[in-house]
Each structure stands twice: as structure tokens, then as C-alpha cells.
């Protein structure tokens, strides 16, 4: 993204990038299983790659290796153009440094590095590794920043909707669900400062919000809806009920949702109940079965990538693939899953 503001076009179409890109002009989105952390890889038709978050650094390199498998063996990339940190919690930036030891990362992006993090007493040690990996050259994202990644056919447009607790101006049509907001206790953690981004590829729109929490979601989406409707929604904060405020989820009105949860983390029944109220919802997907819930209380079994507990988990990913004209997209579970097609709005 070589940072530019207000929709200045970028063009990074090297021969290597063109080779790595989708041969039929599709935008590819991979939701990598990192057991209740987060890691999402996007690859444009030009082969330009964006990794958002990187899972936990523990467990013998489990999450790092799962990300590398998708990057190198599935997406066939030999480097990452952009690595984004949505916020400074270990399950989101834990492997940026170790990934940089294994594969070239050209650009690092985050919300700005704080001096300390009250909820993480080891933050100083952990951020030192990130600073070293990024050579202290990470770039700061702010609410309202916009970018365009050029590629053959459609460009990928990116808007930063929230960052560091700030939100874009509350313009747009009135949010009909605004009155449903019931404030929760103020969240002082870095979750509330998460980066949220909206990606547009033709008519297709995808939104991911890191671990953004309830009151900041309402700050973004009330009394007006500045985002509009989207097609694909990565359910916020692993599907926990301190996030996914109905005033945001119902107003976004996604057709398809993907929850990046773990066997016992996320996928909360309250969040699933909210998703089921979405008027345009056609399908819910989860990276994991919530082992505490019955089958009828979560996504259908065929839409859940990993049914096992952590010990036996194979780490299947979920992939969304957007047609070159942006008018349709498919979602599939794992390499052998049958793609299901959806039409964009």
C-alpha cells in the first residue's frame, strides 16, 4: 500500500506479483485457523498480498506454520507485500516477527505503537521483536485513510473505518437499529482501539474489525450508518458478546459471515443470535465448532471448518473468492470443500 491518503492509486504490478496473482482475475480471501486468534490473507489479481493479524506465537510455532502454509503452498506467494496489526494483543500480532524471519514482508502497518499496554505486562519485550522485524519503519493507519491497490481489471479499494478509538464521520443514512444500542461498561483495553477496514472490489464489499468492542461499534454506527451494507463480514472479536453490537451487525446487513473462533473461545450464543437476525443473511461459517454449544445453536456442520478440539485440530482454512467483475463470490471450507456461490448486491 506504500502509504497514500484519499484514494491515491498504487501500482505494484511486478512480474513476480503478476505470476502469483489469480490467473482469472479473482480476489482471494483466506481465513486461516489460528485457534481463536486471527489471521486473514488477501491476494489481489495482481498478486499483491495483505496479511491482517498473525495469531499466537506459542504452541511450537503452530499458528505461524499454518499461516506460512496458506501463504506459500496454497496462495503460492514467496513474500508478503503488507502485514497489518489490527491491535496490540498477542493473538493478533504474535507472529509478525517470526513470520518475518521466514518470509519477506515489505510493509508493516498498525495503529501506532503505544509506550505501554496496561493489560500486557510483557508488552515491552514483545513489541521489541515487532520493532526489530519492521526495522522500526511500520506505518500508522488512521480512521478515514483510504487506499487503492491497482490490478488488471478491478482495483481493490480500502477504507479505514476505525483506529485508536477514532471513527470516521457519522454521515450516511439514519441507522434504523440505532435505538437498540444498550451501552456496556467502558472498555479500557486495546480491543476498543482496533483497526476496522472495508475492502471494495467492484460491487463486492468485505469488512473486518479486529476485536473492536461494543461501545466503539455504536460510536461508528449511530445515529447514522456511514458504512452502508456489505456482502462478507468477518464476525468481530472471534464472535464474543462484548462485541458484535446489533446496531452495527444488523445495519451492515451482511449476506455471509465468517467467525474466526476456537473450540472454546468465541462463537458466543448471543452473537450467533444476533447474526440470525440479519435480514439478508444467507450463510454463516465458522473456523471452529464451539464445543460448548449444540449443533443447532451455531453454523451448520458443513460450514464449520474444524470440528475437533485443539488436540486433534487439522487447521482447515475458509476461503472466499471474488469474481473478476465483483458481481459474485464463492465461499468454501478447506481445499476439498465445495464452493458455494453468492451474488453481490
Image (cartoon, rainbow, N blue to C red):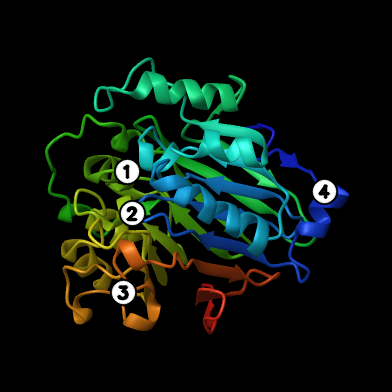
Instruction: Tell me residue 197's x, y (percent).
Output: 48, 46
- What crowding class fits label 2: few (fewer than 14 Cα within 10 Å), some (14-19), or many (20 or more)? many
Q: Which residue is mark 4?
A: 13
Please name the residue shown 66% across and 32% down the image. 4
Instruction: Tell me residue 101's x, y (percent).
Output: 62, 35
Mark 2 vs mark 3: give the one in front.
Answer: 2
Q: CA distance from mark 3 to mark 1?
A: 23 Å
- What crowding class fits label 1: few (fewer than 14 Cα within 10 Å), some (14-19), or many (20 or more)? many
Please name the residue shown 48% across and 58% down the image. 32
Q: Earlier in the sequence, mark 3 or mark 4?
A: 4
Q: Which residue is mark 1?
A: 212
Please name the residue shown 42% across and 61% down the image. 233
Residues at discs 2 and 1 in contact (Cβ within 8 Å): no
Q: Is residue 219 above or below residue 73?
A: above
- Which image quadrant: the N terminus? top right
Q: CA distance from mark 4 to mark 1?
A: 33 Å
Q: CA distance from mark 2 to mark 1?
A: 15 Å
Q: Which residue is mark 3?
A: 279
Q: CA distance from mark 4 to mark 2?
A: 34 Å
Q: Is residue 241 above or below residue 87?
A: below
Judged left or right of residue 148, residue 41 is: left
- What crowding class fits label 4: few (fewer than 14 Cα within 10 Å), some (14-19), or many (20 or more)? some
Amino acid at each position: 500500500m506504500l502509504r497514500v491518503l484519499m484514494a491515491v492509486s498504487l501500482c505494484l504490478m511486478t512480474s513476480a506479483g503478476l505470476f502469483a496473482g489469480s490467473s482469472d482475475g479473482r480476489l482471494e480471501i483466506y481465513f486461516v485457523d489460528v485457534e481463536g486468534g486471527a489471521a486473514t490473507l488477501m491476494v489481489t489479481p495482481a498478486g499483491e498480498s495483505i496479511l491482517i493479524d498473525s495469531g499466537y506465537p506459542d504452541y511450537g510455532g503452530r499458528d505461524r506454520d499454518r499461516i506460512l502454509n496458506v501463504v506459500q503452498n496454497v496462495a503460492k506467494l514467496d513474500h508478503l507485500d503488507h502485514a497489518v496489526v489490527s491491535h496490540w494483543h498477542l493473538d493478533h500480532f504474535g507472529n509478525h516477527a517470526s513470520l518475518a524471519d521466514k518470509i519477506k514482508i515489505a510493509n508493516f502497518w498498525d495503529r501506532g505503537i503505544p509506550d505501554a499496554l496496561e493489560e500486557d505486562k510483557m508488552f515491552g519485550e514483545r513489541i521489541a521483536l515487532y520493532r526489530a522485524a519492521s526495522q522500526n519503519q511500520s506505518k500508522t493507519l488512521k480512521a478515514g485513510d483510504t487506499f487503492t491497490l491497482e490490478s488488471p481489471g478491478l482495483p481493490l479499494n480500502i477504507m479505514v473505518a476505525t483506529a485508536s478509538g477514532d471513527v470516521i464521520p457519522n454521515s450516511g443514512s439514519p441507522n434504523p437499529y440505532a435505538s437498540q444500542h444498550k451501552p456496556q461498561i467502558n472498555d479500557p483495553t486495546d480491543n476498543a482501539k482496533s483497526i476496522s477496514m472495508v475492502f471494495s472490489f467492484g460491487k463486492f464489499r468485505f469488512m473486518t474489525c479486529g476485536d473492536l468492542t461494543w461501545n466503539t461499534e455504536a460510536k461508528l454506527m449511530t445515529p447514522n450508518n456511514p458504512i452502508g451494507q456489505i456482502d462478507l463480514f468477518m464476525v468481530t472479536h472471534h464472535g464474543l458478546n462484548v462485541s458484535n453490537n446489533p446496531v452495527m451487525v444488523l445495519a451492515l446487513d451482511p449476506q455471509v459471515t465468517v467467525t474466526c473462533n476456537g473450540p472454546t473461545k468465541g462463537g458466543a450464543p448471543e452473537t450467533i443470535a444476533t447474526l440470525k437476525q440479519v435480514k439478508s443473511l444467507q450463510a454463516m461459517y465458522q473456523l471452529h465448532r464451539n464445543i460448548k454449544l449444540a449443533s443447532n445453536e451455531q453454523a451448520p456442520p458443513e460450514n464449520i471448518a474444524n470440528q475437533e478440539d485443539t488436540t486433534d485440530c487439522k487447521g482447515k482454512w475458509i476461503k472466499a473468492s471474488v469474481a473478476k467483475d465483483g458481481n459474485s463470490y464463492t465461499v468454501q471450507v478447506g481445499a476439498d470443500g465445495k464452493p458455494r456461490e453468492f451474488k453481490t448486491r
